[in-house]
Amino acid sequence: GIDWTPASATRGIPNPVRVQPVIRGVAYRYISRDEPTAMIMDCGLAPRLARLSDIVTEYGIDEVVHIGIYNYRCIGGGTPDSGCTPSQHAYARALDIHEFGLADSETTYNVETDWIITDGPVCSTRTRDTADQVLHEIACRMHMESLFNIVLTPNYNAAHRNHFHVDLTAD
């Protein structure tokens, strides 16, 4: 159910594929683009995006705006060639989600502006309004359904204030 083709060899990506930007009726769009475009990723990430599409559709969402998938870099900066710990973005096995767009509407759920940072556990924290509630529910479903191995929210640290970081870190 995913429209994909093999992609050319790319540094860091074990099994690169080019995935078309509409997955199960949900458009995946890079934040600085007006229209969705094909995405290069490791083949292991693609089926996770298909399941994410199923989840967000339940909330009336038809667009996921992301900050990126592939970036050959380390956690905290630098490149994997320098011996630091590579980010899952270096393997194209991560996605940074900034915003969700509601179908047939200009309404969005924006992680940066709608997520309320709290001190308590993300999945049992009281939410402020509909946008905050939907964002919390999506983050918690990604975690509870083991859709990704890592789900970081704005509660994690300042570097993640404007997005959910999700990835396929082993173990």
Image (cartoon, rainbow, N blue to C red):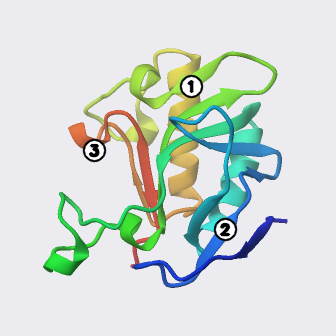
Q: Residue at x 51, y 46 (%)?
A: 140
Give the label, 3 or 1, closer to the camera: 1
Answer left or right for 67 relative to 152: right
Which residue is at a point 48% across and 68% down the rendered structure image? Answer: 93
Q: Quadrant of residue 113?
A: top left
Work out which quarter of the rendered image holds the N terminus and state it. bottom right
Q: Quadrant of the C terminus?
A: bottom left
- Residue 18 is labelled as 2
Query: Which is more N-terminal, label 1 or label 2?
Result: 2
* Residue 19, above or below 171: above
Is 9 left, or right, of 50 in this rendering? left
- Provide the secondary structure element on which disc 2 rests: strand
Answer left or right for 22 relative to 156: right
Q: Can the viewer see residue 135 in this picture?
A: yes
For label 3, the crowd category at 10 Å Cα-Cα, with few meaning under 14, some 14 to 19 and many 20 or more, is: some
In this rendered view, identify the residue nearer to me: 147 or 31.
31
113 horizontally vs 7: left or right: left
Asked if residue 28 is positioned above or below residue 133 in the image, the reply reads below
Image spot of residue 66 (x, y percent): 52, 43
Residue 143 position within the rendered picture, expressed as x and y whole percent measured from the top left:
50, 55
Residues under labels 3 and 1: Cα distance? 19 Å
For the residue marked with disc 1, what is the amino acid? Tyr
Mark 3: amino acid: Tyr
Taking depth in this image into account, of 106 and 60 the one nearest to the observer is 106
Q: Are marks 2 and 1 in contact (CB under 8 Å)?
A: no
- 30 and 8: which is toward the camera: 8
Q: CA distance from mark 3 to mark 2?
A: 30 Å
**Which residue was labeled with disc 3?**
156
Determine whether the residue tagged by mark 3 lies in a helix, strand or loop: loop
Residue highlighted by disc 1:
109
